[in-house]
């Protein structure tokens, strides 16, 4: 294999569970996913990231050093994948690195809109010796867009059907949907929480980073009063284009909701987890049902596809609508987000637009990302 023909996509999402790396060949009609790798983020760096995400005034020192450390980790993720697949830098056209979001303040909020992803692409280029595309969100925001979600263009390109209306549902830390309806512009937006609240509550009460299979929460009883209250979050009445993050859905917000009604004092941690699971599934469901479109099929990707309790509620909520994972469309649910950033790197290299103004609200399509050469 001495031809440059692969793109690598690197993604670390809101959950900060690991770095996903995927190698793909876009030369043929259908995507050829050569392989993928999940790269661990050391606990010490996760702590730094949590500080950067939560603190109102994180130190510039911490920001700068974590940017470099994440760059090193992203590079390691790419080189581990390359060596597992027997590839070297000459086989790689470019790496598309999303980076790690530490703050996402899109238009429509109270501050000047901005979005920050860290993981220095100069380091990734130097350590891997591959060209790198990074900083995908800010060109869209410069045109007034949300800078998110950016995966719908990839979903549209690979998962559309000529006659069926499909929804691609990514359940990461935050959940987002892409609506692919023949003859209509692609739609897409963040529906609200994915795993973020479930993970946070599980970590606090069990010490585990996530609720394996949703089994722990399934021991609890849903509290309807709390559920109704959670659904009052102001994000849900906003119209798309819209995007969100940990800034809006976090344990501080949940704690406030728990304190509002005294009836909830008697809830066990499992009851709260069961309610969060239902809340997450219902908020996704309501967004899809409110589209008022005859949805034929829903394809799930992201780590939430492994939360069987969550998937069970979604299946119940949707009744007759088919709900599968993206594995049925040829890409493993764990690989879709990283694959999208490999695809966006390919678009950047070919000077093609990567955003969809119908999704992000930008004033027009634009080429996304900066290009970093290894030498
Ligand atoms: N076996 C499992 N059971 C329950 N939940 C799981 C399981 N495996 C993964 N998850 C959930 O999936 C999450 C990771 O999903 P994913 O990597 O898609 O999210 P992310 O990193 O926030 O991605 P993105 O922001 O790109 O959508 C974990 O934090 C966890 O909540
Ligand atoms: Mg992840």
Image: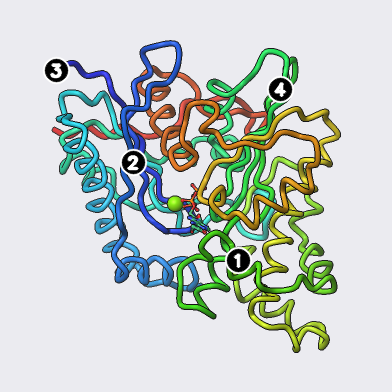
**Residue position marked by numbered label 2 in the rendering:** 21
Distance of label 2 from label 3 (alpha carbons): 21 Å
Contact flag, marks 3 and 4 (Cβ < 8 Å): no
Q: Crowding at label 4, few (<14), some or many (≥20) Cα neighbours within 10 Å? A: some
Contact flag, marks 3 and 1 (Cβ < 8 Å): no
In which quadrant will I find the N terminus? top left
Quick one: label 3 or label 1, which is nearer the N terminus?
3
Distance of label 1 from label 2 (alpha carbons): 25 Å
Asked if residue 308 lies left or right of residue 343, the reply is right
The residue at the point 50 percent across, 22 percent down is: 353
Q: Nearer the viewer, mark 3 or mark 4?
A: 3
42 vs 108, nearest the viewer:
42
**Residue position marked by numbered label 3 in the rendering:** 2
Q: What element carries label 3?
A: loop
Distance of label 4 from label 1 (alpha carbons): 32 Å
Residue 172 rendering spot, x and y as whole percentages: 54, 51
**Residue position marked by numbered label 1 in the rendering:** 197
Quick one: label 3 or label 4, which is nearer the N terminus?
3
Contact flag, marks 2 and 3 (Cβ < 8 Å): no
Q: Is mark 4 on a helix, strand or loop?
A: loop
Contact flag, marks 1 and 2 (Cβ < 8 Å): no
Q: Which colour scheme is used?
A: rainbow
């Amino acid at each position: 294999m001495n031809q440059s023909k692969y793109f690598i996509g690197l993604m670390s999402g809101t959950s900060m569970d690991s770095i996903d790396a995927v190698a793909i060949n876009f030369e043929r009609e259908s995507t050829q996913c050569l392989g993928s790798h999940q790269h661990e983020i050391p606990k010490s760096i996760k702590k730094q990231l949590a500080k950067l995400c939560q603190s109102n005034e994180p130190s510039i020192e911490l920001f700068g050093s974590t940017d470099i450390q994440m760059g090193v980790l992203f590079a390691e993720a790419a080189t581990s994948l390359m060596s597992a697949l027997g590839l070297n830098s000459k086989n790689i056209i470019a790496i598309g690195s999303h980076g790690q979001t530490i703050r996402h303040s899109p238009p429509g909020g109270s501050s000047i809109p901005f979005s920050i992803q860290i993981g220095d692409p100069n380091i990734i280029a130097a350590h891997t010796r591959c060209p790198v595309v990074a900083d995908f969100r800010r060109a869209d925001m410069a045109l007034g867009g949300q800078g998110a979600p950016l995966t719908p263009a990839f979903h549209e390109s690979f998962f559309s059907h000529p006659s069926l209306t499909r929804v691609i549902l990514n359940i990461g830390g935050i959940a987002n949907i892409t609506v692919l309806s023949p003859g209509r512009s692609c739609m897409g937006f963040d529906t609200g929480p994915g795993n973020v609240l479930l993970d946070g509550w599980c970590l606090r009460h069990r010490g585990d980073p996530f609720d394996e299979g949703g089994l722990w929460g399934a021991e609890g009883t849903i509290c309807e009063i709390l559920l109704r209250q959670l659904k009052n979050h102001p994000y849900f009445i906003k119209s798309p284009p819209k995007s969100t993050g940990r800034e809006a859905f976090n344990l501080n917000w949940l704690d406030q909701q728990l304190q509002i009604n005294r009836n909830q004092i008697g809830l066990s941690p499992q009851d709260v987890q069961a309610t969060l699971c239902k809340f997450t599934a219902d908020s996704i469901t309501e967004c899809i049902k409110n589209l008022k479109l005859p949805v034929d099929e829903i394809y799930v990707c992201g780590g939430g596809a492994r939360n069987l309790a969550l998937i069970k509620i979604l299946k119940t909520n949707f009744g007759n609508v088919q709900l599968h994972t993206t594995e049925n469309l040829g890409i493993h649910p764990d690989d879709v987000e990283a694959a999208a950033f490999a695809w966006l790197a390919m678009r950047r290299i070919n000077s093609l637009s990567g955003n969809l103004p119908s999704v992000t609200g930008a004033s027009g399509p634009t080429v996304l990302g900066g290009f970093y050469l290894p030498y």
